[in-house]
Image (tube, coloured by chain):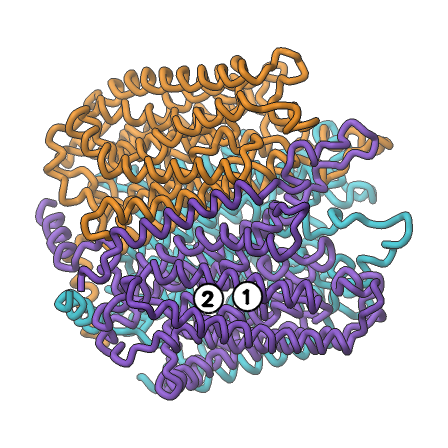
Chain colours: A purple, B cyan, C orange
């Protein structure tokens, strides 16, 4: 067994080959954009028509980028440390596949979103978009958490990032829909992709690792670090790439209210579904975030605080109920082993968010938006826009996303099933010791005893 | 006993009713303000007199808002995880009552701070103010930590937020005083309100839970996460709602220096009051923050780095001495059981901050402030201003705040004493197991053993 | 022994004397700068030539400052909590010496970087610079971690901050080189200073504390909090004090790509150097950050994403190899006991960064930079600039820095060797219990048992 999961050649080889390919592609394809290039930004500096430095997109987007960055690396990373013996892998593999994905996403998204004379232009907006795409991969990681080798995860990321970029291109560039916070592109896509992957990788004997597939007291506290950071910075996530000014401001605020309402729903239903009325950390850690997912599309629209709170409350409710009643059924009936319950946090709330987005778009009118209309719905001025068709396109986008995710997950799942990646055996899932140097419990006890004795 | 603390109906019912009321009130009363509304922000966009997007208040305040948000949810939440068996409740109940309070505060503050044709206008500034009010509730939470049910905490929040808004209205709108960082409105109010509540809820037999009312090694490290985040972001807290430009810049810097000096005082006196010269985590976790509290009023004034450091040094000193010598007396003589020692971190430093604010305001002169005077002291131009009266009003505000806090805490305390909220029995205070699904220690040991054996 | 490490008088005395001196010096020397002073900022406000508030440097630099602040207090503090019994000291002493150093650095840097009529002017830029200097001290702390008393650390900080300011003055003001992210001034200086100090403080019998000089499972997770925050915010660190506009934007992006590539190299080589292909937490926690260090000088230049990724990949590689093969040799042959392996994280990558900076500067041309040239290389317009001489000056700066660091560390090491600071005995290194009130393991077990029994 030790042999089959040995990463000594597999992981270095894959990492080095991938990074070398990335470096070569960046060298041939990637250029600074106008706001990061010394020459281009300062082109007219001696003229009267000079741009002021405060107009550089850096100052509009960089604080949001950093908040998103924290969600990707601390939020997702620590959220998954709830498992008692999988903290190193949760934070560590999250770190690895995120670092890879953001580079690969820069290329894939740049390729699809418009080359400039054959070159990809990069700046803070492309950095945010790359982090977004990475988020989608990390959502899928949540479904297969504990049951995959780092090599499998990197391979999954290669395919998922690519398909994410294709789907995003269809939605944003071809269908021209709105999805600033990614209810569809990020959450729905990431969730159903991951669920399909874990379905294909179904392990009938996963029970052998059951005793490790749960939390201990301190691991739940580490996970709360992830939860709280995701919760706090979600307003930045949804608003990070909206238009400047009122849309960015409004999106952040709508998300803030949606999450607050969602949190009350989560506590309410977590206590309600427990016979003794006790709260379940799994719900608090996850369902309280569903409100951010569910306003990912409509958040930039004139959803109002009122609307946001209703959406958030609904999202929290279905998420808790999903954890309690749906997840066990998915596992027993559909053979979907969803370690983190991403269907409840990203799947259903993502679909809800897509529906809310379609309805809100269909109800948009110049009466409400005034001159701000074209700043939210980009193609208003081109004349091809009317609210109803817009709502229809939003709905079509959801269907496209679900199709792409399920199909992509299916293919990727079968690729990941090849017995060459050093996947953990059923008896050693959810266990850091396979891929990390970990001191044994006995070691630790002895160390502590020795320390005590010497005092 | 299990019966009396069962939250199965109480908590869901209260959460759902509160959230439904909030949603209805938001639906009828709350509107986007000029900077978040698509129509209003873009009204003149086709005219020559167009506003630039960078003038949207979002770009002046949102980074500060996010820092404040981190303080409220991570700072306060993790600061209280120092108890060995109360980490879930500390972070979790903090999360719940903060999510409720920020919604309720938006309504209460909006109601008192000026309706616009009967409507409350919301944007990033109202979000910061709501977080501030929430901070006050969380300070009070610190006094009753471990001895209250989540239902009690929500009921406390209902009353405290309301009274906070009234007190804030009296101070800022009627008396017209300065308190940008809330030495009075937030810290003094929250502290004395909470102390009065815990006085009314006095438990003569709390000793039965004494063995749980302390930290273990790792819980102290979790608490340090809270401490450090509060410490780092306090400059953002105090400067979040000052005027743009020099006041915001100056406030952040004054707070930075106050906290640095406070930290040295904290380490000095923590070692000094211990017979073996050993540092006490309780002091480091709490007293090192007193410097931020104590410049909450004067921080935006021309206090200078020099003045800030003196104030910070004093605040750290009285805070450590308070923990060492005053807290035991408060408990034994006045029957005030103050779990987190909020009197030392928020009470005394808050009063110190109010006094420093009054003195600094009384010394303010056009010589020092130049044209910046009216940007710090709002009513200079109306002519009713002179430094001495200003100082007097600041001092009166402290008295008003103390009165409101003590009276409000008294009433609220008696309301919370009703035996209907599922409060924990004396034998089970400071224990997560009452309200949370927690694996027992035995469980954990067995799990870990099983894991080790299988390796 | 208890006697000799007793801090009861030593620590309070030193802290109070230092803070009193700081307060006096601040009172006599420090003034608000133009952007923080109420009068100066608003001087022309009534004129037509009024400055807009958004031009206040606060809005360009404060978000970066807060990210840097997080790196200093959470990043460095928690990174060092990996030791099983030294978490309080890691976070706590980091907190203490950082709070002191940033005040002392404000004075020293202000003194060397240009007095204004005998006064030091402070604002957000001086706050960032003070945090940078503090970072250097914390790097050195990493070398002596676990083997020094807090008094020793404060004394080290006094000398190191002073020499840092001198070295920075020589590099930036006399030689006029670039080093915005501090590959030389911060990392190389801090690393070699610390290595020399720990060399002088060599303990031949440190083996007696060997059992405590390692991590346990949860301490490694706490350390990952530090790692991830350093990693995420490094783009802010390197860009915090570059010029506004394209340089700040470009620096952040270059650093982002360097770190991403570095992370893949770290995972690759960590698995490769382990016989079983298992990843080592020490590598992930540290080497993954080397990419940020290595673009500290060249990050603001037109290094391109391509160049940044190559540099990051190299940095991660040499860092892992350093931990694996060089650190043991440094200890056995050169008697350098480097607790955190700062030579691998800051030393070698810092030198690499200096060399990359020299080469990139030597290759800089107006063709590439256009009018942006003088915004990166300050003295272009004065005519004394040509790329080759610039590259030469950068290289000379590295030599100066190494000389200053080694010489300064030597002197400081001998000063710290005096037997008056309460240093821990060889048998009690890496142990919080010497300087902190810590419950014993036995205590904890009893507490937990009692808790369980009572349920």
Q: In the image, which disc is placed on residue A139? A: 2
Q: Chain of mark 1?
A: A
Q: Quadrant of residue C61?
A: top right
Q: Nearer the viewer, residue A258 or B137?
A: A258
Secondary-structure class at tag 2: helix
Could you tell whether A383 is left or right of A292 in the image? right
Q: Quadrant of residue A356?
A: bottom right
Residue B177, placed above or below residue C442:
above
In x, y percent, where is residue A443? 13, 55
Q: Nearer the viewer, residue B226 or B137?
A: B226
Do labels 1 and 2 touch, CB within 8 Å?
Answer: yes
In x, y percent, where is residue B379? 77, 45
Could you tell whether A302 is left or right of B210 in the image? right
Residue B239, placed above or below residue A179:
above
Precedes in sequence: disc 1 or disc 2: 2
Q: Is residue A130 visible?
A: yes
In x, y percent, where is residue C392? 49, 15
The residue depicted at 73 percent of the width and 54 percent of the height is: A245
In x, y percent, where is residue A190? 50, 68
> Is disc 2 surrounded by few (<14), some (14 to 19) or many (20+) residues within 10 Å?
many
The residue depicted at 58 percent of the width and 74 percent of the height is: A312
Q: Is residue B288 visible?
A: no
Q: Specify whether disc 1 shares its chain with disc 2.
A: yes
* Residue that label 1 marks: A186
């Amino acid at each position: 067994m030790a042999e089959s999961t040995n990463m000594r050649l597999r992981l270095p080889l894959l990492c080095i080959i991938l990074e070398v390919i990335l470096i070569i592609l960046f060298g041939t394809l990637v250029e600074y954009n106008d706001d990061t290039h010394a020459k281009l930004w300062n082109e007219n500096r001696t003229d009267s028509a000079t741009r002021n430095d405060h107009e550089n997109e850096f100052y509009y987007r960089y604080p949001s980028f950093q908040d998103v960055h924290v969600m990707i690396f601390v939020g997702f990373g620590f959220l998954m440390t709830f498992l008692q013996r999988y903290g190193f892998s949760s934070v560590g593999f999250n770190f690895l596949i995120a670092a890879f994905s953001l580079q690969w996403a820069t290329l894939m998204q740049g390729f699809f979103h418009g080359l400039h004379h054959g070159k990809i232009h990069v700046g803070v907006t492309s950095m945010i978009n790359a982090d977004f795409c990475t988020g989608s991969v990390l959502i899928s990681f949540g479904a297969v958490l504990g049951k995959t080798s780092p090599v499998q995860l990197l391979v999954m990321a290669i395919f998922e990032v690519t398909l994410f970029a294709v789907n995003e291109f269809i939605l944003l560039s071809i269908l021209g829909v709105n999805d600033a916070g990614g209810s569809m592109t990020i959450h729905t896509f990431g969730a159903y992709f991951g669920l399909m992957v874990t379905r294909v990788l179904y392990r009938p004997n996963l029970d052998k690792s059951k005793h490790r597939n749960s939390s201990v007291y301190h691991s739940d506290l580490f996970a709360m670090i992830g939860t709280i950071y995701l919760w706090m910075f979600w307003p930045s996530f949804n608003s990070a790439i909206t238009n400047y000014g009122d849309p960015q401001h409004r999106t952040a605020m709508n998300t803030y209210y949606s999450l607050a309402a969602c949190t009350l729903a989560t506590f309410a239903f977590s206590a309600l579904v427990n016979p003794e009325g006790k709260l379940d950390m799994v719900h608090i850690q996850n369902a309280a975030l569903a409100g951010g997912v569910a306003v990912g599309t409509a958040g930039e629209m004139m959803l109002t605080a009122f609307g946001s709170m209703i959406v958030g409350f609904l999202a929290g409710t279905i998420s808790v109920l999903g954890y309690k009643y749906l997840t066990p059924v998915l596992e027993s009936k559909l053979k979907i082993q969803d370690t983190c319950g991403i269907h409840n946090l990203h799947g259903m709330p993502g679909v809800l968010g897509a529906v809310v987005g379609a309805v809100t778009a269909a109800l948009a009118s110049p009466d409400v938006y005034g001159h701000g209309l074209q700043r939210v719905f980009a193609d208003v001025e081109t004349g091809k826009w009317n609210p109803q068709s817009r709502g229809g396109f939003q709905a079509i986008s959801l269907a496209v996303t679900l199709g792409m995710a399920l199909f992509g997950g299916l293919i990727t799942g079968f690729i990941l099933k090849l017995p060459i990646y050093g996947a953990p055996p059923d008896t050693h899932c959810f266990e850091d010791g396979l891929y990390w140097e970990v001191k044994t419990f006995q070691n630790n006890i002895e160390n502590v005893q020795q320390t005590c004795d010497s005092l």
